[in-house]
Amino acid sequence: MQLYNTLSAEERAIMIDDAGKQRLTLSFYAYAKIQDPKKFRDDLFVAWNALDALGRIYVAKEGINAQMSIPEENLEAFRQTLEMYDFMKGIRLNEAVEHDDHSFLKLTIKVRDKIVADGLNDETFDVTDIGVHLKAAAFNEILEDPNTIVVDFRNHYESEVGHFKNAITPDVETFRESLPIINEQLQNHKEDKNLVMYCTGGIRCEKASAYFKHQGFKNVYQLEGGIINYAKQLKEEGLESKFIGKNFVFDNRLGERITEDIISQCHQCGKPCDNHTNCENDGCHLLFIQCDECKAAMENCCSTECLDIIHLPLVDQVRLRTGKQVGNKVFRKGKSENLKFKHSGELADTALATAETRGGAEHSGAKQADIHQKIKVKKALLGKAEHYYVKAKVGQFTVENQTLQIGDKILISGPTTGEQELILDKMIVNGSETNIANIGDKVTFEVPFRIRLSDKLYKIVN
């Protein structure tokens, strides 16, 4: 019986594209007492592998922590595999704001000592005595209370690209580092302040809220479902976003946009940017922020040293990294001495640019080099992607704003797709070929590249 992956990431990506199925990116967690984590792990692998589920999952005696990608058509069958366990009946699945078929390319389920490395001795306090869960509307309301202190329990490379306004954002590399720092920093406010915390999906705050109640904090609250669920509720309820920027995620996307604000800068040139990349050098893999221009010029590398290395013969690359710890296992995310703007944007509460224009804001009064200047394209949002038929190379979109007609110059944009321009010469509207599509219409037309559910459709108007 196969209990491990046999395909490479590249082979899996091709299979996903050939299948042409829409996939959902989701996450969930549950604290529970699991007597045999190894058997639990193997049972999950068999069930999920049969459903073409992919992802990174940690199981331990204390529960499960999962980030996954599953075919949309298998969602209910996937839920049924969870319902088999009492502690996961009715569990909340946090769906990503921006889906990407390639968010995960393997099914990896690992048995760990803990589902989150928090460094805490759970025997010393009641881990079930947690803080009050707040939904998005209530969270927005308590942020307006002058007696509220809001704390970001993520790492610096996460909060740098997006966070709640006025939040305390510890300059830490790991979750476990932030707990004693915040405890010491807020020692004098255990009774007179609301301690309000948040993280990506809620799991870190679940344990942190219990820890801080044990430390004597009287009024402890946490954002239910984290930033992911908050963003979903914003859309469903039409709420104002108190979060600014992008939410860092731990899959191949490395982020999903919550607001159009860009609050961080390229670590290499200082241009407003919030796109993370991993250094191309297999002996480094440093995680850092890199704009499109630096990505092209540096070939995804963090330094000229790494750029030189990736052009060496493979045997020489292997020799150079033999015996050294790989960069992605060293918690120095974005803090290499090679990165000139490595501290930029960490505490920014105002936008340096917007994702719509990605304008070139100046840094410390200095103008960017000419190669970083981009012509602003005026565009109007038309709608969003609904489906892509791989074999026919046809995309389906829903028109939500304005009209679309033959001859229009359009732009399809997304975090993985990038920005692709086309001139529309033929389209099918609600099943029939026609020259114009109106608001609410379903439109299909040929697209010579892969599109994804997170992609948006624009009309170029200049």
Image: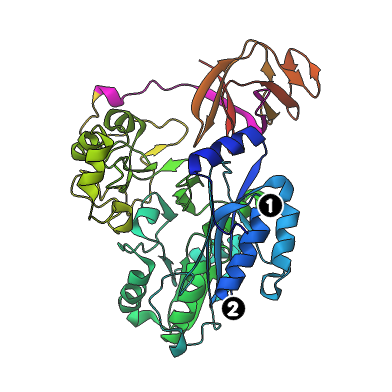
Picture residue at 25% right of the left edge, 39% below the top: 315
Looking at the image, is 156 positioned above or below residue 31? Answer: above
Q: Give the residue at the far front of this rendering.
A: 1
Neighbourhood count class around disc 2 (C-alpha, 10 Å): few under 14, some 14–19, many 20 upward: some
Q: Quadrant of the N terminus?
A: bottom right
User: Pointer 2: what residue?
Assistant: 34
Can residue 136 be spotted in the picture? yes
Circle 1 packing at 10 Å, graded few (<14), some (14-19), many (20+), is: some
Dot 2 amino acid type: Ile
Disc on the earlier residue, 1 or 2: 2
Closer to the camera in the image, 401 or 225: 225
- Helix, strand or loop at disc 1? loop
Q: Is residue 168 left or right of residue 113?
A: left
Q: Is residue 237 above or below residue 218?
A: above
Question: Residue 89, percent across and down?
Answer: 72, 70
Identity of the residue drawn at 59% across and 78% down: 34
Indicate whether 190 appears above or below 389. below
**Image mark for residue 331:** none
| Number of numbered labels in the structure image | 2
The spot of residue 295 in percent (x, y) is: 33, 33
Image quadrant where residue 14 sits: top right
Judge left or right: residue 257 versus residue 234. Answer: left
Could you tell me if residue 365 is visible in this image? no
Residue at left offset 49%, top offset 39%:
10
Q: Position of residue 285 (x, y in %)?
A: 32, 47
Image quadrant where residue 279 sits: top left
Residue sitting at x 68%, y 53%: 50
Between the residue at mark 1 and the residue at mark 2, the CA separation in whole angstroms equals 23 Å
Asked which secondary structure carries label 2, the reply is: loop
Q: Which residues are drawn in magenta?
A: 370-394
Is residue 384 or residue 220 the one in the foreground? 384
Q: Which residue is mark 1?
A: 51
